Amino acid sequence: MKNLLKDFNEKDLKIFNQEFNNFLPKKIMDFHVHLWKKDFLNKEISEERQKSNPFTDQDIIDGFVFKDFKTISNTLFPDKEYSGLFFGLPVKEVDLDKANKYISDVCIENNCYGLYIPEPDLNEIPENFFKNRFVGFKPYPDLVDFETPADFSKLDIDVSMFDFISKKVLEFSNEYGLILLIHIPRKGRLSNKRNIEELRKIGEKYKNIKIILAHAGRSYCYEDIWSGIQYIKDMKNLYVDTAMINNFSVNKLLMEELGPERILYGSDLAVAALKGKNIDINNKHYFVTNTPKYWSLSSSEMNLDDFTFFIYEIIRAIKIATQSLNLIREDIEGIFNSNAEKLIESIIENKMYQLKNGKNL
Ligand SMILES: [Zn+2]
């Protein structure tokens, strides 16, 4: 890892102490953490792609291992017990076998759990899936071969969810009631009718799957979600994570429409350890960072020393939403820890899981 904490200073610590220390529960479960090593990349990442995605940025791509996660969480959340649900870096240049093996090694060694990143057409569940401490899958649309426009700002990953979530993954997840953390495709996000149809289809056909929308369906702007949420809020077993959502009105809507018990705090580390904020201009999402990046708005002329970490902005946006709705302590504790804990416990306590844990699955 490049030293992501080089910008950490007393002002950040003050934010933690004044705004978050009393607000956050002692135990925090981060439902969205990527871990990887640089040598898992088996192809060069094109310059275009490096410029287009925070995860392929020079400050991030070098890797983020479990030790880095501990260093960051201990520094940014002093005296909290900060744990995570882990998975690899889902970019097409990554060797997925190595990525998944590393997650499994980390989870076995540290008594935690992970999600398996499947190939889009996975048709055989890897051996020892449960013994390797996987509790579900993190399929990713970027792994499908699709036409890439020369101009990345026009990128619309116009693939179906069924192009990157195989039938085998759906059936196996349904059989054992596993987590399916979906990064939804298509530019329209939850405003896209096909996305809604496909989510409903998965929910109806595979009732035991715990469907979690990563980044609440990539809803960084209120415009992304206010309409679409109406078509999915009745789905049983639908949850959202808060990874990289910095907008309190999105969180407030989620809390009102889904209820706090279906919201899982997630950060999207390592990117969330950069300093910046996701903002909403004219109903479109932009990253803003303290240092200029190809993929963000910034300024080399202005002094942006007062920025703090994306991860703090995520928590701040949750805090303001909980305050505006007068949520009680138990709800807040649920969002940051026990909702996730209950989901994972329900999987590992599942009799079938225990049964198969002794066998070769
Ligand atoms: Zn992510």
Image (spheres, rainbow, N blue to C red):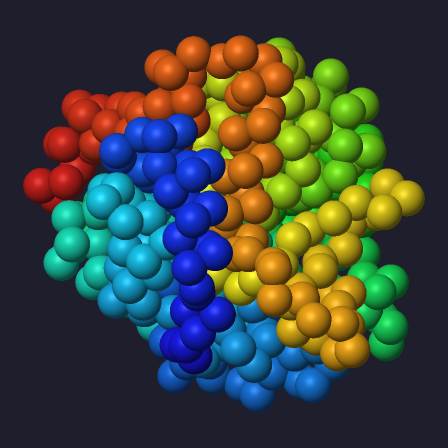
Q: Is residue 195 left or right of residue 120?
A: right
Quadrant in which the N terminus appears: bottom left
Vertical relation: 319 (above or below) 62: above
Q: Is residue 314 left or right of residue 334?
A: right
The residue lying toward the viewer, choosing from 306 and 340, is 306
Point 55% across, 43% down: residue: 314
Q: Is residue 163 visible?
A: yes
Vertical relation: 58 (above or below) 358: below
Vertical relation: 314 (above or below) 3: above
The residue lying toward the viewer, choosing from 10 and 341, is 10
| Quarter of the rendering containing residue 195 | top right
Residue 354 on image: x %, y %: 14, 32
Residue 203 on image: x %, y %: 56, 23
Q: Is residue 305 left or right of residue 122?
A: right
Vertical relation: 82 (above or below) 126: above
Q: Residue furthest right?
A: 282
| Quarter of the rendering containing residue 261 | top left
Point 43% across, 12% down: residue: 328
Q: Is residue 196 visible?
A: no
Q: Is residue 329 left or right of residue 182?
A: left
The residue lying toward the viewer, choosing from 54 and 325, is 325
Q: Residue furthest left?
A: 358
Residue 55 on image: x %, y %: 56, 68
The residue lying toward the viewer, choosing from 211 and 271, is 271
Residue 167 on image: x %, y %: 52, 42
Mark count: 0
Point 60% across, 83% down: residue: 45
Point 53% across, 64% down: residue: 274
